[in-house]
Amino acid sequence: MWEENVDSEQSTSEVGHKPDYSPVSWREYFDQMEDVAVGASDSRDVFRIYKAGSDGPLLVLLHGGGHSALSWAVFTTAIASRVTCRVLAMDLRGHGDTLVRQSDDFSTQTMSSDVANVIRACYGETPPPIVLIGHGVGGAIAVHTASNTLLPATVGLVAIDVVEGSAMDALHSIQNFLKGRPKSFKSMDHAIEWSVKSGQIRNLESARVSMVGQIKRCEAEEADTLEQPSPVTDMVVERNEEFYDQSYVNDKENAASETVYRWRIDLSKSEKYWDGWFRGTSNLFLSCNLPKLLLLAGIDRLDRDLTIGQMQGKFMMQVLPPCGHAVQEDKPEKVAEAVAAFLLRHKFAEARRETKKSEKENCNEN
């Protein structure tokens, strides 16, 4: 049953109330939102970013394919309560509310350059110490950004559920997954409900803020012909239950006069870049001369190179409690705990006073 995968969904159901699938604003989690222009004045690209905090190291958060910076919203609150830090989460090109001239150029070289350009536009040539943190594709971009020293102020690297071996093995199933999703939704609430019940995001709080960055409102007559999703065959959504309900989708007969919500990015069109995102990332990760942390949704993700590297103590690693691929959304508190421990161990950040107090109390109790 899908309810077993959704803690917040389950808790609301138990008390007899219908879960609230309405969207939540980014303002609940970030201090500010900005549109950052980079490039020449006559051909600028504009990247949407969200920021929080004003002291400590700068955590640059890079989301996975199809998601947006808002996938880090709940994590941002969780990490800020543990350590003193600054957060900058950005919509990658082609994603969220970022507007670029070549929105279909998803090469690692272009995307890692985007990250460096945005940080330079925000902080000049002397940014605070930077810790690159990326999930999925964003993790691969973080690895490439660090290994090419595009941001010399980088002091640490965190990759979340991105392993070359398992990623390469899963590439053949991505198109089936994309074909199995609804192509449109009747409302934002329906999209949030679908994301939770399908297991795409197993945390209702996170889904309510992050789905806003994945889909957008458009008038049906302005959209392409609304196709119904093909039958789900060989659908792989990590280890989640498959879920598909026709009631979430606008049918063609009624679509003409209705507002619909469509995915902001057609990920299927990025297929030619998929191999380049992940091939060689394990060795690049291992060769980065930085303190490193690898967070995984399951031990089965480890490939041979990373297994050897982990045995040699080349990086910290933690396997999180059962969750889907959207690790920082499914288990934001656990991810924040792991990242905070990494930052404190390497003295990149200082613990919040409340965190120090609770740690001291735990020591006294023991």
Image: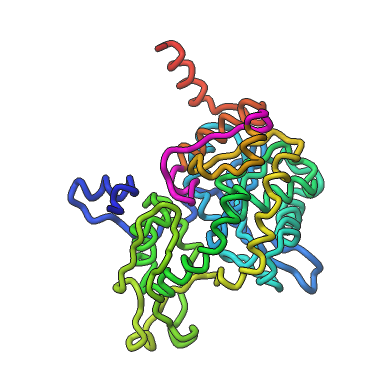
User: Is 264 located above or below residue 354 in the figure?
Assistant: below
Instruction: Point out the image quarter for the C terminus.
Output: top left
Q: Residue furthest front?
A: 304
Q: Nearer the viewer, residue 105 or 164?
A: 164
Q: Is residue 139 left or right of residue 323?
A: right
Q: Position of residue 299 (x, y in %)?
A: 51, 39
Q: Is residue 239 visible?
A: yes
Residue 134 included in the magenta stretch of the image? no
User: Is 271 located above or below residue 136 in the figure?
Assistant: below
* Residue name at image x 31 percent, y 73 percent: 246
Image quadrant of residue 133? top right
Q: Is residue 216 visible?
A: no
Count of marks placed on residues: 0
* Residue name at image x 61 percent, y 37 percent: 307
Q: Residue furthest left?
A: 16
* Residue name at image x 48 percent, y 16 percent: 360
Q: Nearer the viewer, residue 268 or 142?
A: 268
Q: Which residues are magenta?
A: 311-331
Q: Position of residue 311 (x, y in %)?
A: 63, 30
Q: Position of residue 30 (x, y in %)?
A: 53, 49
